[in-house]
Image: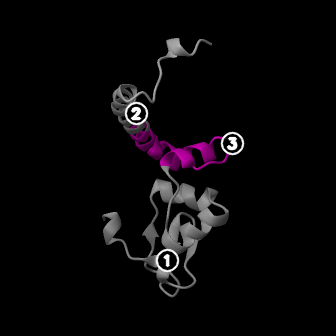
Amino acid sequence: MALDERPQFAALPGADLQGGVLIPAGRPDDRLPLSPLEVLTGRYVHGEKQKAWWDHLTTLIELEALAAVQADPEAPVDAVLALVPDVHAAIDSVGANLRVRVPEARRVGRVSSPAEHPG
């Protein structure tokens, strides 16, 4: 099921997160399994990000989730390992975007070479 096709559980009052499953209030038989990123978001978000998670199902980004599990010896290993390909893809995407921007920035004089800044 595509993300767009998921029911909007945030609009249902009293929705609860139990054991990696979002349980809408009044509909305990309609359980929707969470993605690995959603499991990690439910475990590690606090404050404003927690409000965004509960109100709008806004997840952490992959790199935030990976950083959050680093200090947790009880992190849900399956969820973390499932994220590894997404983290690699995110890092590769950032690298590709930066490689495209560097020649442009050098052409307009916004980036200097390492030789211009001796260490």
Q: Nearer the viewer, residue 83 or 100?
A: 100
Give the residue drawn at x 60%, y 70%. 51
**Sequence-wise first label, 3 or 1:** 1
Q: Amino acid at mark 3?
A: Ala
User: Separation of disc 2 and disc 3 at Cα?
Assistant: 29 Å
Measured as percent of width and height from the top left, residue 119 is found at 62, 13
Q: Which mark is nearer the camera, 2 or 3?
A: 2
Give the numbered dot on residue 98. 2
- Residue range corresponding to the magenta coloring: 62-90
* Secondary structure category for the residue under label 3: loop
Q: Secondary structure at mark 2?
A: helix
Specify which label sits upstream in the sequence, 1 or 2. Answer: 1
Residue picked out by circle 3 = 71
**Closer-to-camera residue (109/78):** 109
Residues at badges 1 and 2 in contact (C-beta under 8 Å)?
no
Q: CA distance from mark 3 to mark 1?
A: 29 Å
Residue 109's place in the image compared with 82, above or below, is above
Residue highlighted by disc 1: 10
Q: Amino acid at mark 2?
A: Leu
Q: Give the secondary structure at mark 1.
A: helix
Circle 3 packing at 10 Å, graded few (<14), some (14-19), many (20+), is few
CB within 8 Å, label 3 to label 1:
no
Amino acid type of disc 1? Ala
Q: Position of residue 49 (x, y in %)?
A: 60, 63
Residue 78 visible somewhere in the drawing: no
* Residue 70 is covered by the magenta coloring: yes
